[in-house]
Image (cartoon, rainbow, N blue to C red):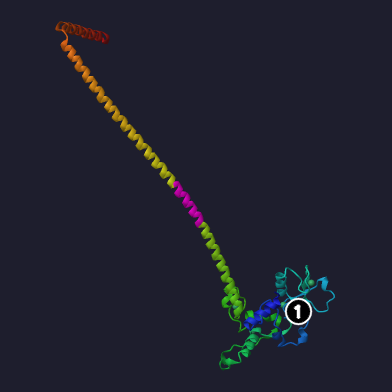
Amino acid sequence: MSAAEDEKISKSKTGLSPVFVEQSCFDKKWILQLNQPEQIENFICLICKKIVNNPIEINCPQHQDMDESLIVGEKCLKQFLNDNNNTCPVQPHNGCSYSQNRSVKVHIGALKVNCPLQFEQDSQTTTQGLQQEGEGNETVICNFNGKIKDLNDHLHNACPLKLLDCLYKLFGCEYSYPERKFHFDLVMKFVNSSQEAIHNYQEENKQLKLQLNEKDEILKLKQKESENTIQKIERESQQELLKLCANIEMMKKDFIEKEKHYNESIKLLQEKMTNFPTKKREKIMTISHLLISNILLLFLLICF
Ligand SMILES: [Zn+2]
Ligand SMILES: [Zn+2]
Ligand SMILES: [Zn+2]
Ligand SMILES: [Zn+2]
């Protein structure tokens, strides 16, 4: 869509478009207040059909035979090239060639105008049918009457109609007067970009949560594993303990059996001893006594 079409749409939607926007081309009606049509007929922007601001001359060799002046406002041209893939605004072709036109700039800068904010206020009261006539004493009036080149200085430093910055400056508005459609777009843009940022944050959050869950899962698995090994070790050691107990029990039984056996043999021996003839018994006794005394002697000899 061209800048001119844009302009038409914004005009039809809001009813009014701002007369003066810094760097943009100038409103024809406003300039014609103090100038004759002949003074401006050659300085119409090819793109927006207003009076050029910061005039640029299109001078591609393709258009050498054309009679009319091929002049556009700098802001309009930049916008057009941007929106149309650098195609020339005169006829569609690539490699558009252009340059500043100083003499047109000087001519435009010297045009006499009233304050654009005053012009806007006047056209608003005429469209509203002079409703505020009774409150006229409250209306501020700007009496500026000067050259276009001095306008910026007037609006920034002297104009009583220049409001403080627009309330919507936060959203990127450069105007000093209310522009509803424009404000709506600005706010929507702001809201959209905020929503996008929120969406991005949410996505990031989701990703982080997923990662966290994954780590949690791994941790749980490891915990379960270690619990399992602990249980296994406990079970094994319990089994070992039981085996040990069984062994001890078996040894005990074995010991009792052996003891019984031993006692029986002693008894048998005693019985045999009592049945032994007394003489033989005495003889054995003496022999054993002798043997013991001899062993004692030997022991003493070894010791000393
Ligand atoms: Zn223009
Ligand atoms: Zn061209
Ligand atoms: Zn003013
Ligand atoms: Zn604004």
The residue drawn where x is 36% and y is 37% is 237
* Residue 218: in magenta span: yes
Numbered disc total: 1
**Residue 105 image point, x, y percent:** 75, 78
Q: Which residue is mark 1?
A: 106
Identify which amino acid the numbered label 1 is placed on: Val
**Residue 34 image point, x, y percent:** 72, 88
Q: Which residues are magenta?
A: 209-222
Name the residue nearer the viewer: 264 or 12: 264
Q: Which quadrant of the structure image shows residue 111?
A: bottom right
Q: Is residue 279 visible?
A: yes
Name the residue nearer the viewer: 283 or 33: 283
**In the image, residue 262 above or below residue 57:** above
**In the image, residue 166 above or below residue 145:** above
* Residue 239: in magenta span: no
Q: Which quadrant of the structure image shows residue 269?
A: top left
Image quadrant in which the C terminus is located: top left
The residue drawn where x is 49% and y is 51% is 215
Name the residue nearer the viewer: 111 or 32: 32
